[in-house]
């Protein structure tokens, strides 16, 4: 039997509203403290935030205020993406992960997901076609009816 803690530790989540916690960049990207600085920097590089964090005085120990309000919405979402990338989950849940970001950040996130999560199972709630363009299968739910679409 798989316990709740084990279950939660096995998958990653990228929410619609990016969730950051009061603390540091390091604690937000690696909340369990299991990864080296080198691994954290690689994750930040891959999610396009390495230069932003490196430019800050305290680098990985830079402050993140409650809810991450001292970071832009796009940067917060990219930090959430970096957290999931560092975790290396085989199952990824995305709840409108790009709904609250600009089109440029959306494109960056979609590219990273295509490249870095190609071998993962991704369960995505989406309302826009570009979000599901790379899917193998889609379930369309409308007015309580569900339709399955399988892409070739």
Image: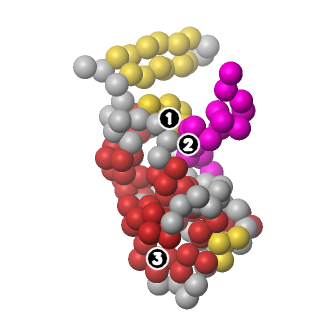
Q: Residue furthest left?
A: 152
Q: Secondary structure at mark 1?
A: strand
Asked if residue 70 is among those painted magenta in the image, a careful observer would answer: no
The residue indicated by pointer 3 is 52
Magenta segment, which residues?
A: 1-17
The residue indicated by pointer 1 is 91
Q: Are marks 1 and 2 in contact (CB under 8 Å)?
A: yes
Instruction: Say if 83 sits above or below 91 in the image.
Output: below
- Quarter-of-image position of residue 65: bottom right
Residue 37, position as x, y percentages in the image? 50, 70
Local crowd at mark 2 within 10 Å, few (<14), some, or many (≥20)? Answer: many
Instruction: Say if 71 sits above or below 101 in the image.
Output: below
In the image, taking residue 100 as reference, residue 21 lies left or right, namely right
The residue indicated by pointer 2 is 12
Residue at 59% in and 69% down? 26
- Measured in 3D between alpha carbons, the distance from the residue under mark 3 to the one under mark 1, in whole angstroms, is 28 Å
Q: Quadrant of the C terminus?
A: top left
Instruction: Say if 31 sits above or below 59 in the image.
Output: above
Residue at 44% in and 69% down? 38
Tell me the tag on residue 27: none
136 and 30: which one is in front? 30
Residue 112, position as x, y percentages in the image? 36, 51
Q: Quadrant of the N terminus?
A: top right
- Measured in 3D between alpha carbons, the distance from the residue under mark 1 to the one under mark 2, in whole angstroms, is 6 Å
Residue at 62% in and 41% down? 9
130 and 58: which one is in front? 58
In the image, taking residue 21 as reference, residue 58 lies left or right, namely left
140 and 77: which one is in front? 77
Asked if residue 3 is among those painted magenta in the image, a careful observer would answer: yes
Q: Secondary structure at mark 2?
A: strand
């Amino acid at each position: 039997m798989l316990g709740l803690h084990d279950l939660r530790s096995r998958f990653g989540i990228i929410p619609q509203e990016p969730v950051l916690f009061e603390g540091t960049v390091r604690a937000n990207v690696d909340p369990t403290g299991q990864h080296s600085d080198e691994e954290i920097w690689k994750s930040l590089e891959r999610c396009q935030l390495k230069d932003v964090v490196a430019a800050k005085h305290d680098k990985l120990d830079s402050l993140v205020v409650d809810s991450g309000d001292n970071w832009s919405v796009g940067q917060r979402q990219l930090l959430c993406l970096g957290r999931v990338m560092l975790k290396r989950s085989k199952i990824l849940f995305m709840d409108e992960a790009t709904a609250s970001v600009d089109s440029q950040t959306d494109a960056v996130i979609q590219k990273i997901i295509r490249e870095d999560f190609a071998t993962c199972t991704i369960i995505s709630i989406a309302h826009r076609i570009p979000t599901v363009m790379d899917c193998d299968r889609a379930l369309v739910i409308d007015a309580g009816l569900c339709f399955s679409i399988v892409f070739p």
